[in-house]
Amino acid sequence: MVKKTIKVGLLGLGTVGAGVYRLLQMNGAQINRRAGAQIEIKKILVRDPGKKRTTEVDAGLLTVNPREILHDPEIDVVVELIGGVEEARTYVEEALQHKKFVVTANKDLLATAGTGLLQLAREKGLNIYYEASVGGGIPLIRPLKYCLGANKIARIMGIINGTTNYILTKMSLEGMEFEAALAEAQAKGFAEQDPGNDLEGRDAAYKLCILAGLAFSSRVRYEDIFIQGIGGINKRDILYARELGFTVKLLAVGEEFAERGLALRVYPALLPLTHPLASVFYENNALFVEGNAVGEVMFYGPGAGALPTASAVAADLIAVVRNINHRVENGIMEADFEQKNVVPVESLSSAFYLRLQAQDEPGVFASLATAFGKENVSLDQILQKRNVAGTAEIVLVTHVVEEKSFNLALNRIQKTPAIKRIDNVLRVIES
Amino acid sequence: MVKKTIKVGLLGLGTVGAGVYRLLQMNGAQINRRAGAQIEIKKILVRDPGKKRTTEVDAGLLTVNPREILHDPEIDVVVELIGGVEEARTYVEEALQHKKFVVTANKDLLATAGTGLLQLAREKGLNIYYEASVGGGIPLIRPLKYCLGANKIARIMGIINGTTNYILTKMSLEGMEFEAALAEAQAKGFAEQDPGNDLEGRDAAYKLCILAGLAFSSRVRYEDIFIQGIGGINKRDILYARELGFTVKLLAVGEEFAERGLALRVYPALLPLTHPLASVFYENNALFVEGNAVGEVMFYGPGAGALPTASAVAADLIAVVRNINHRVENGIMEADFEQKNVVPVESLSSAFYLRLQAQDEPGVFASLATAFGKENVSLDQILQKRNVAGTAEIVLVTHVVEEKSFNLALNRIQKTPAIKRIDNVLRVIES
């Protein structure tokens, strides 16, 4: 039986919730035409119905009681936009138990509890849609699930945190210091007051869980991701990188190696200026995907924001309505995900960038070369930079080496008397 | 009734056909898992079964008789990869009449006969899938239909012809002359021996028909597209453009203006070096989409090639199998397309780049300024370049003006005695 109206309950009316409400008003006729039915928001769960809001919402829609949505048999779809894990999980489970399809923009929830929730959805003959959980309005989930579905994917690499990309762009294009760039990002609302999740790479790692799961048909655990944040990046690193032909980006990288398994990491890295991801500036996000048939494709756009994220939520709503009325989804592909081996970062190989302070005296380069040589680490480029009070700043880029060997060389260097301090170590993406 | 095996007939075993055959061998298990059924190629239509092929194909699959595919009741899906319009249309119609779903990579067919064929498919309760018709393996059709389905799209702008982008890239990055770049493109197989369709913009215009149709929910006719090719581009235009902060790209642009309608054109244009499309090099393609919710998103990747195109065909095969077994498609959205008004190019506005030869004498700039001023065209930048035997090369960029006014100014300039020759006129994209 085809329903002419599909009733939806929203959980949350924050930035994204208000964006979804607004978008359904702005483009409602088109959205309903594409969905093949009228989409009607019946109730919205809020904490404080009296709160002043920038988007005008019919007060009669608001409720503080989640059961008015989760237990309402008229509501077919629950859109979870409250964020966080525990409360959201409880609501999503209850929604599924009450036979409601779920749309969510909640990356933390998907990354930590996605497997179980998708399993529950499958048992109930339902599904969970989560296009908005990664990359804001950029189509990423559907392209990975469907458009590139005939490919074995060898690597995904992306800029999937807008806050850190904004900061690194400000440092790179405008020569700002880290602290000033962070302050500006906070002032513009691109960084939260407590920016730890972004700066330390956890936000990107949650998103990598979701993307790598789809790319490699694997259940990916957050704990399996190697994470390094951007806190250690100095303006000078960015200047030197540029001199060497690179820019610095916080990258989320997932790779599958035949027989060895998955390599998953989030770290700031030097990226060639000619790489398509190098031109992804400010709060924009992009995902680069390498498939064995398609080659290299990239998806680019705003990674956050009320309306961009609402665009993804509304695409999911169109899909879920078609699903309800025409049984579009025939199973949950995530259920077929295998558990795959994860390669520890020490066993991976990479080129490295190294910035250090050394005594400005004869023989320093020789002792560095010796230390690297003993671990079979060969050097690609060396810059000697400003010399202040007898201290020279030296910048090195190695060829690709096993991380283990590089770490051993680093140990040797730290023990070299002429080396005063190692300031920064960053990985280098060569292509 | 869910079919465990879906039998497919291929029409054509050229580059793309062989790629599809190869991809189904390479990634068959995954493709079948995603499709939820076994995809089996039952027959392949070829002209010459004895022809030596680089991809080894079971000779028993080959036939020269199209009816062995089009009339075989066991075959559920026909994949049309022969190209061209007349023969392909006959086969696709016959396939639909015989209750077969159709997958095609044929942009000419879609652009010229798509409306009627999709209508016929709808009447028969079938559908036509054409992800591979534009942008090779880059997901474009599905994102426009589904992922961005909640957006009103204001503009699409893309590099959708790999041959011309290869030539312009060679001229831009390597300083090659047009003829040398074309010869290299031909030698590498990126340009055909008769490259007219590519160089003169017709190939891009066919693709723009398809993309603009989806973006603006409109039936777009090839004849409504303003087309200018890249034949007039000189290496010096590219050098001057760079000096002014731009690169030169062959762009396909579709816009919808409230009340006025659609503006559709294919032309070489100056594009700011900071624009995401400016970094799309060589044979790569990209489509930039501006939606009223999502903002600006871009899709990037290889726009042609056997396996990339096969990746798109195979994604369609997965979709069609799911459709057959689970009635996934509930109608053909193209059937709702409206006929929209098309704004003639003269009524549009643009900034312009102009390169001309003038007598190197006092008063030339003044007479140029007067000619522009009389038509209310104001100038943004002026370069005076090499002076050979009393002739100065002058490069101008105007502010945004109505094309009509610019043309009137151009007429005045042509009549100015000090102006010897107008060498090139290109449009300038400002953002």
Image (cartoon, coloured by chain):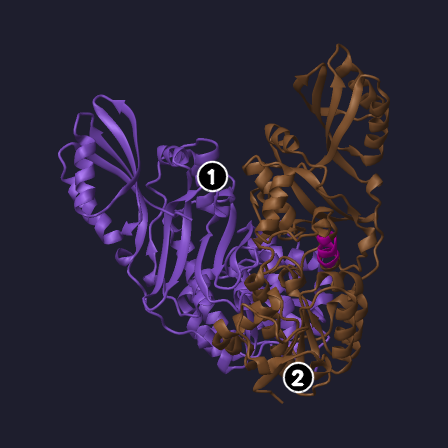
Chain colours: A brown, B purple
Q: Main secondary structure of the magenta part?
A: helix
Which chain is mark 2 on?
A
Which chain is mark 1 on?
B
Which mark identifies residue B169?
Answer: 1
- Label 1 environment density (alpha carbons within 10 Å; few <14, some 14–19, many ≥20): many
User: Which residue is drawn at the image coordinates 74% and 61% (left, top)?
Assistant: A108
Image quadrant occupied by the N terminus of chain B? bottom right
Residues at marks 1 and 2, CA–CA distance in whole angstroms? 54 Å
Tell me which corner region of the image, top left, top right, bottom left or bottom right, holds residue A334.
Answer: bottom right
Q: Amino acid at mark 2?
A: Ile
User: Which residue is drawn at the image coordinates 65% and 72% (left, top)?
Assistant: B321
Indicate which label's residue lies in the foreground, 1 or 2: 2
Q: Amino acid at mark 1?
A: Thr
Q: A78 or B255: nearer the eye?
A: A78
Is A207 inside the magenta-drawn segment? yes
Residue B348 image point, x, y percent: 30, 56
Q: A310 or B267: nearer the eye?
A: A310
State whether residue B261 is above or below residue A91: above
State whether residue A60 is above or below residue A171: below
The reply, left or right, for residue A52 in relation to residue A402 is: left
Tell me which corner region of the image, top left, top right, bottom left or bottom right, holds residue B74.
Answer: bottom right
Question: Is label 1 on the same chain as label 2?
Answer: no
Which mark identifies residue A75?
Answer: 2
Residue A363 in view (yes/no): yes
Is B261 inside the magenta-drawn segment? no
State whether residue A318 is above or below residue B290: below
The reply, left or right, for residue B25 in relation to residue B212 is: right
Range of residues picked out in magenta: A203-212
Which mark identifies residue B29?
Answer: none
Q: B20 or B140: nearer the eye?
A: B140
Q: Secondary structure at mark 2?
A: strand
